[in-house]
Amino acid sequence: MKTLKDLKIKKGSYVLVRTSLNVPIEDGQVRNQFRIMRDLPTINILVNAGARVILCGHIGSNGEQSLKPVADVLETHLKLVMSPEVLGSKTLDLRDKLQDGEVLLLENLRLDPREKKNDEEFARGLADLAEVFVMDAFPAAHRSHASVVGVPKYLPTYAGINFMHEYDELTKALKPKTPSLFMLGGAKFDTKMPLVEKFLDLYDHIFIGGALANDFFKAKGYEIGKSLVSDVSLVDSPLLSHPKILVPVDVVVDGPDGRHIALPDNVSKEETIFDVGPATVEMLKPLIQNAKMVLWNGPFGDYERGFEAQTVATAKLVANTKGYSVLGGGDTIAAIESLCNQECYGFLSTAGGAMLTFLEHGTLPAIEAMESES
């Protein structure tokens, strides 16, 4: 896999960059610039070398959103114009008018259904805009989409600064120093079970939080009320009694009697589990403080409904640990962003699903595409 350091950037050359622009938008403005800022080092290297840079990326899942709010942010850092389309005559005209060191942002890739279908003609159309391709969108690297795995078939391809930073840090997380702690939150345990099983051989302790813990409670025969569970049954699973696996010792529930703390085996049929409780954070405290590696993906509570207190409390512990920490997942980062700057943690990943996929398989479709191109 070639990296940006291997690229001899020619002044005036056209460089297509796949960027991580899938950021939260609220009232027409970018709510969190974390991913955008992590793409800037790669873009600035190309701009400062006099390349004519074409940025492409997606926002949202259905292609209905515009990248205009992202363009507004980028314009404060770059000499940038935005195309109202992905491919077409307007894009070609703006591309041809680019001067050295200027940047063209294409509209949301997912406006064109061919992006998600990994359409060969669409990939070639993107490739025809440039002479070189730089892949810097690690959060999209687990997608077999045209801009991720299709374009490298037609252009010399290099991994960008953020992409390699993610790759190196997550590779390091696969070889943790002991004692080590892996904390996994969020939902859909059916998709995360293979990762948990793999990490039993890598980490000393694995804490299961968020809605994932509900699957353990259900398998133990506890009443979980209206709580979210996965499409998987852990009844008779060896994971239930595995000594390395930890689950919450208390939970925050909401229901007819209001929000309160309960033991996992004392939830009523009308209640919903929304977060882990403070005793659970206290249980994690010595493990976090003593760990030489803390790896964490996914919040412990329903962040969007305001149940972020224990995620934040845990993040404060991680920020003060002397060990190394790697954190990822959009909701995790969003929940802790107000605590302190990024230097509080060893590494904050821009990825969510791509992070988990890489940790499970040790590679990603984008990596395989670049290695094949090499």
Image (cartoon, grey):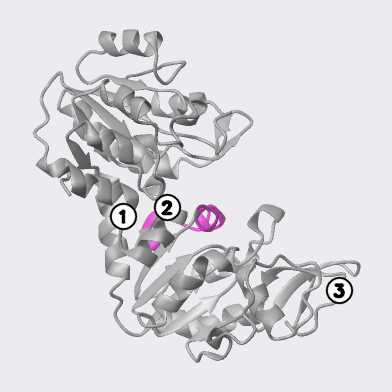
Label 3 vs 1, first from the N-terminus = 1
Q: Residue at x 39, y 31 (%)?
A: 119
Is residue 337 part of the magenta span, yes or no?
yes
Q: Residue 335 in the image: state x and y as whole percent.
A: 56, 56
| In contact (CB < 8 Å): disc 3 and disc 1 | no
The quadrant in which residue 75 appears is: top left
SS type, badge 2 = loop
Is residue 265 part of the magenta span, yes or no?
no
Give the residue type that dot 3 points to.
Lys
Q: Residue at x 34, y 40 (%)?
A: 148
SS type, badge 1 = helix
Q: Which residue corresponds to mark 3?
A: 269
| In contact (CB < 8 Å): disc 2 and disc 1 | yes
Q: Which residue corresponds to mark 1?
A: 166
Q: What span is colored magenta in the figure?
A: 330-345
Q: Residue at x 31, y 63 (%)?
A: 362
SS type, badge 3 = loop
Label 2 vs 1, first from the N-terminus = 1
Q: Residue 162 in the image: state x and y as whole percent.
A: 29, 47
Q: Nearer the viewer, residue 302 or 311?
A: 302
How packed mark 3 is, by other alpha carbons closer than 10 Å (few <14, some 14-19, many 20 or more), is: few
Query: What distance separates the C-alpha of mark 3 from that of mark 2?
Result: 36 Å
How packed mark 2 is, by other alpha carbons closer than 10 Å (few <14, some 14-19, many 20 or more), is: many
The mark closer to the camera, 3 or 1, is 3
Asked whether, in this view, residue 258 is left or right of residue 118, the answer is: right
Using the image, determine if residue 21 lies above or below residue 333. above
Q: Which residue corresponds to mark 2?
A: 351
Give the residue type that dot 2 points to.
Ala
| In contact (CB < 8 Å): disc 3 and disc 2 | no
| Residue 254 shows in the view | yes
Give the residue type that dot 1 points to.
Glu
